[in-house]
Amino acid sequence: MKGLNLLILGCILMLFAGSCASKKNKYAETNKIHTKHVEEAVDAIQKPLPPQMPSPEVFVADIKGKRGDLDWVGTVNFDMRRPSFVIIHHTAQESLEQTIRTFTLEHTQASSHYVIGRDGKTVQMLNDYLRSWHAGASRWGKITDMNSQSIGIELDNNGREPFSNVQINSLLRLLDTLKANYRIPTENFIGHADIAPTRKQDPSALFPWKLLAEKGFGIWYDDYLSAPPIDFNPGLALQIIGYDTRNMSAAIVAFKRHYIQSDISPELTDFDLQVLYNIFLKQN
């Protein structure tokens, strides 16, 4: 149980540090609610197991997911799960303060790990290891719970304006840290619209995906493109890349919003097919 105790101690120290940092902060009250939720998670880890079930044939888990019919021996070899994706959003709101308020109201049921202002100011709102509610109903490849595997980053942008250089520079610094800390694969830096093509458009077609790819965050197509073979299947290629193709038009628009940007119609031109084929080859 030594490893478990160290984990709990680490959580408590994190809570203490967060509490100290929140003093004299206008978000002190919402920070208290945040701390309460983390404390509840720590309590769940520390909670004793329920008594042994009377019959070994009755396999029922309690509300914490612990099997009451089994003995408990705590392994010492474990750690917290690391995120393996970064999902980039734009806020579709008018200010950093408005977005922070949205994420500190419980009834909104929405959050993100980080919010980056137009002026480059970066606000962290959740520990990287915890599950933020930023992706919603989404899918990438076979993953249907993106919240459990990703870090969400919101950029203060209403969706109709270019992203400022200072904001993108702050984003790049943050992405560099996240990629190094969690060994996130290059291709796993994607947008909200990529994983929710029927619902979302963020970040907009104005987002500099090519620049990010040049820095190692995401992939981009080559300058010299080849025509795909005659038997190339665009729908299958989109699916293999990761897109949810149950609505093919939405998947095409999401792909083009990310890689074409100058045209986000639901049809694939010859150039679009060349780009798709090139990205497909990079994913395989």
Image (cartoon, rainbow, N blue to C red):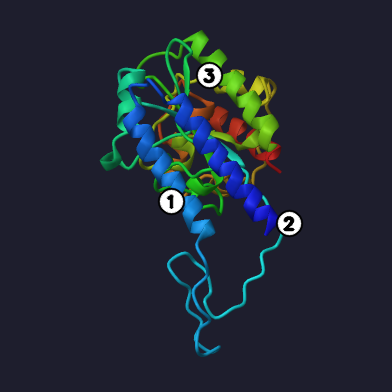
Q: Nearer the viewer, mark 2 or mark 1?
A: 1
Q: Earlier in the sequence, mark 2 or mark 1?
A: 1
Q: CA distance from mark 2 to mark 1?
A: 23 Å
Q: In the rendering, which numbered label is found on residue 77?
A: 2
Q: Secondary structure at mark 2?
A: loop
Q: Earlier in the sequence, mark 2 or mark 3?
A: 2
Q: Amino acid at mark 1?
A: Glu
Residue found at x 53% / y 15%: 168
Which is more toward the observer, 6 or 117?
Answer: 6
Q: Residue 80, can we see it?
A: no
Residue found at x 54% / y 81%: 69
Q: Amino acid at mark 2?
A: Asn
Q: Nearer the viewer, mark 2 or mark 3?
A: 2
Q: CA distance from mark 3 to mark 1?
A: 40 Å
Residue 273 at x, y percent in the picture: 57, 34
Residue found at x 56% / y 27%: 271
Disc 1 target residue:
40
Q: Secondary structure at mark 3?
A: loop
Q: Residue furthest right?
A: 77
Q: In the rendering, which numbered label is found on residue 208?
A: 3
Q: Earlier in the sequence, mark 3 or mark 1?
A: 1
